[in-house]
Image: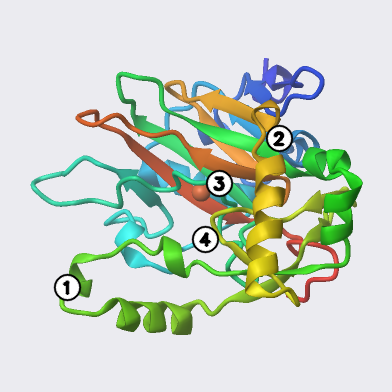
Amino acid sequence: MTTTETLQIQSPPKDQIGAIVTGIDVNELGADAPQWQLLRDAIYRHRLIVIRDQQLDESQYVECARKLGRPQVYFQSNYHHPNHPEIFVSSNIAENGQKVGVARTGHYWHTDCSFEQQPLSWTSIYPQVFPHDARGTLYIDMEKVYRKLPDHLRDLVDDAVVIHAGQLRYKVQASDIDRSLQELLDRINEEVPPVRHPAVIEHPVTGEKILYLNRGFSVAIEGLSHEENTAKLAKLFEFIERPEHIHEHAWSEGDLIIWDNRFLIHMSTAVKPGQHSKSYRIGIYDDHPFYRGLVR
Ligand SMILES: [Fe+2]
């Protein structure tokens, strides 16, 4: 039996996200294997896929990302794996006495790189070291949230433009010592200036309308005063982050998790003090603009 015949994609229950993929070893698939297209289609259809039971070393993980799309090299090198810049390391474990990657990443609602002009299409994660207490990722399906928005909030976002900025989530590095906060803010602003995106985007493949807004990086709705923004964004975030909208995926050994950042906002769960955690991430660009109408 070939791998093509064994691939199974189990759809999530109604109103849930995340398809479970079994019966493949991504290391065995050549670049032209038809399974890659099946996986891409599944990401668009189900928002998130979990490919079970994978055994990848760092080079194989990068290779897998290349076969799916174009791997991102994150703009801040302090996150990079020392030998594979495509791998973004979230870790609180020192290796050979050296800090590797960055600890306490993404513990707030966000979507990766919404503060860039060309946001990141997909995020993949491949957890490495599991803390004693379950570690995982929380997700909210923003297409579903848009469908459920009450009229007074829908009026606020339809045709609106949102400003996204990564400045306040910047992680201070050893090389920042002796620099003032103002200097750091100015430098980040220069490196990744705030960008504008529609508050409601259209998915380039499915055409669905999606609310593109997150507490981490969405700092203002264009055209509103500071006071109006504070009040209105608070109402929107309160609705978006309602418990009934939240889906949790607890990581299991061997999981390779991939999601579409157009549909989902996410947040990592916290690691308890004294526990070790390490996860690899590779951002992947697909062949489409992030949303319809965005010029690449
Ligand atoms: Fe993230």
Please say whether residue 45 is visible from this viewpoint. Answer: yes
Q: Secondary structure at mark 4?
A: loop
Separation of disc 3 and disc 4 at Cα?
A: 21 Å
Is residue 74 in sight in this rendering? Answer: no
| Identity of the residue drawn at 61% across and 36% down | 139
Q: Are marks 3 and 2 in contact (CB under 8 Å)?
A: no
Instruction: Give the camera-side residue of 129 and 237.
Output: 237
Picture disc at residue 109: 3
Residue 41 pos. (x, y %): 78, 40
Label 2, residues with CA under 10 Å away: few <14, some 14-19, many ≥20: some
Q: Amino acid at mark 1?
A: Ile
Disc 4 packing (10 Å; few <14; some 14–19; many ≥20) = many
> Camera-side residue: 180 or 75?
180
| Distance of label 1 from label 4 (alpha carbons) | 28 Å
Q: Cα distance, mark 2 to mark 4?
A: 22 Å
Give the residue drawn at x 76%, y 61%.
Answer: 288
How many angstroms separate mark 3 from mark 2 (CA)? 32 Å
Q: Position of residue 287 (x, y in %)?
A: 73, 60
**Mark nearer the N terminus (3 vs 4):** 4
What residue is shown with label 1?
177
1 or 4: mark nearer the eye: 1
Residue 35, numbered label: 2
N-terminal of the pair, mark 1 or mark 2, is 2
In front of the other: 147 or 77: 147
What residue would you read off at disc 4?
Answer: 72
N-terminal of the pair, mark 1 or mark 3, is 3
Q: Quadrant of the N terminus?
A: top right
Q: Amino acid at mark 3?
A: Trp
Residue 178 location (% of width, % of height): 16, 78
Pointers 2 and 4 in contact (CB under 8 A)?
no
